[in-house]
Structure formats: C-alpha cells, structure tokens
Image (spheres, rainbow, N blue to C red):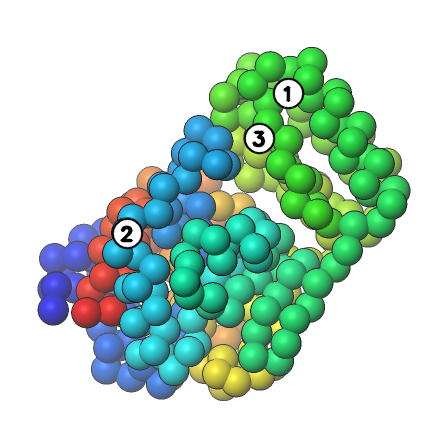
Amino acid sequence: MQSLEKTVQDDTATQEMLSLVLDEPERWAMFLDIDGTLLNLAPTPDAIEVPEALPGQLHRLSNKLGGALALVTGRSLAYADALFKPFAFPTAGLHGAEIRSAAGMHTLEATPEFQALKHALTAEAEHYPGVLIEDKGPAVAAHYRLAPEYEKVLEERMHHYAKVAGPNWALQLGKMVFELRPARSSKGDALERFFQSDPFKDRCPITIGDDLTDESMFAIANARGGVSVRVGAIGAPSCATSRLSSAALVRNVIAALAA
C-alpha cells in the first residue's frame, strides 16, 4: 500500500488520523466536499475533470468504512452522480437542500418566485461578460472566476437579490462565486441529518473541504470529537483542526486508504 507517511506531508495530525482510519474503520465516517477538495478547481463549472481512478477508489474506501462515506457539495445531487458514475454515494447536494441517505431522499423545490428571480439574474448577468450563472434548482450561483473585475458590483447585486428572495434564502460566499441557497440548508445541517441513521450513526466524523461553505461541517466534526481538514494554502481563518495543501494530495490520501 502507498505509504501514508509519504502521502501526507502537510500535517502530522492528519497523518495520525488517517492511520486510525486504517486501524479502526468501523469508528469513522468520512464527509468529502467535491470542488477544490476531491477535484481541482476549473475556470468554469463544466470544465471540472475527474481522474479515471477516483470513482473506484472512493467506492473501495466506502466499502472499508461500511458505507459511511458521503459527498457534501454545493453541486446538485444529479451532478455529483454524473461525476462519479457508475457509483451513487450518499450525497448532500446544494449545501444540504438535497440529501440522499439510507433513510431516503430529502429535496427542497424552488418556488415560482425564486424561478422568476433566477430568470432576472440570468438576464442581468448578460451585461457582465464572463460572469456565469449556474441554475441549481432551489439555488443559484453567480461565478466570476473568468471576470474578477465584476466582483464588487456582483456582490452588491447578489445582496439585492437576496433581499428580493426573502428570509427563506441566504447569500453564501465562496471561491469566486456568490450563491443564493435555501437558508435552512447548510453542510453542517446535512451532517446532522446523516448522523440520524446507519451507517453514519454513532461514528466520529472526518470532514474534508476547501471553502467557507465547509466551515459549518468542520464545526460539527469538532463538536463530535472528529477531525476537520481544510484543503489549500494557509489563508483565511478556519475552524478546521488540520490542513492538506491541495486536492491532488487529498486524492493521494484517498488512494492510500482505498488500496
């Protein structure tokens, strides 16, 4: 098996935690973000590339954990399934607005008013070349990675649309993206829902993510005596207890654990 000591170079605590996964797989549940964590970030949402070996590695690791591996993402559940086919892992999509677990499906729907808001936002974005609007059903994201010069004006406009949407939606900031999502959904809430049923019930969480949207699941992991891992260079403050420098290193860890 690929040596974890060689694989995990960033953080001793992370190395020790991953060694424990191999020794006591029945104790742990793993929750993984996708963009920037399992997969490298890309200029546009549709440009994401999935390494050929990764879906099978996640499947083998899930089997080692007795099925207690879930994807927790701002992407839709259907999008996550397409990335890692033919496997369909327990998944929280749209920051928890969609959840598929052993207990069944939980999905929020967009209201007619929110549908109209998305149409208005899409039409306005045509005035900002390079800004991409991603319709996620009960959520909508405005990506400005290709047009960083519009960050300030886009932030102002997204605050406007958040007010129009009302208290049932919240403005979520991310890496080069502003997103309106259901206010009652967060990645932390998604973890708590997973923990209500097997195979996640009574296990310690390992959470790995790279963005502000992952902080709520880091907090849950810390409160439950688990481990939280922030991916990326040291920058913004985080409540994560450990760090890995890149998505490539996360994939090396997955490969080592799945071997």
At label 3, the amino acid type is His
- Name the disc covering residue 152, or none: 1
10 Å crowding of disc 1: few (<14), some (14-19), many (20+) = few
The amino acid sitting under disc 1 is Lys
The spot of residue 47 in percent (x, y) is 43, 34
Q: Nearer the viewer, mark 1 or mark 3?
A: 3
- Above-or-below relation of 56 to 64: above
Residue 143 shows which numbered tag? 3
Residue 133: mark: none
Q: Residues within 10 Å of mark 3 (few under 14, many from 20)?
A: many
| x and y, in percent, of residue 227 in the image | 40, 67
Residue under pointer 2: 52
Q: Position of residue 248 (x, y in %)?
A: 27, 47
Q: Secondary structure at mark 1?
A: helix
The residue at the point 53 percent across, 64 percent down is: 91
The CA distance from mark 1 to mark 3 is 13 Å
